[in-house]
Image (cartoon, rainbow, N blue to C red):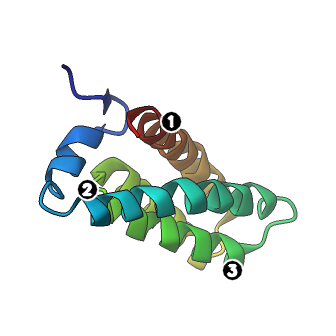
Amino acid sequence: NQSPVDVDSGFSYHLFAAAYSDSPDVLEEIVSIYLEEVPERITTIEEALSPINFAAIVKAAHSLANTSGTLQAERALDAARELETAARAADEPRVQAAVDKLLPLIRSMLDLMQRAE
């Protein structure tokens, strides 16, 4: 059976899960936390765009970067770091561009994890 892979983000749930094959409880906990917290981070970012709240975006982007790193999702990790950097610089055009890049990646990964669970 073929591994679910999100082509855009480069994220493979089964490659990620294989890294935790000896610790299924840890894998289950990571997936559970991801499915619970990531939608909240997406909402935080969307709500922080108007009026712009750079501090809230920094915090949410940092959290998404950590999560993406844990999942070994390099494209999402890079996009989250890009958003965090732009928000720290209070550069609204760069923030919007980074959000436009990051959120589709994160949503796609979220969908993949929900289907793979």
- Residue 1 shows in this picture: yes
Amino acid type for the residue under numbered disc 2: Gln
Give, as a three-letter code, the residue at label 1.
Asp
* Quadrant in which residue 43 is drawn: bottom right
Label 3 – label 2 distance at C-alpha? 26 Å
Disc 2 + disc 1, Cβ < 8 Å? no
Q: Secondary structure at mark 1?
A: helix
72 or 83: nearer the eye? 72
Number of labels in the image equals 3
Q: Is residue 98 above or below residue 23?
A: above
Query: Which tag is nearer the camera, tag 2 or tag 1?
Result: 1
Q: Nearer the viewer, residue 26 or 40?
A: 26
Kindly identify which residue carries mark 3: 55
Q: Can you name the residue that lies furthest to the right here? A: 51
Residue 10 point in image, percent of width and height: 28, 38
Residue that mark 2 sits on: 72
Element under label 2? loop
Q: Nearer the viewer, mark 1 or mark 3?
A: 1
- Of mark 3 and mark 2, the one earlier in the sequence is 3
> Which sits earlier in the primary sequence, circle 2 or circle 1?
2
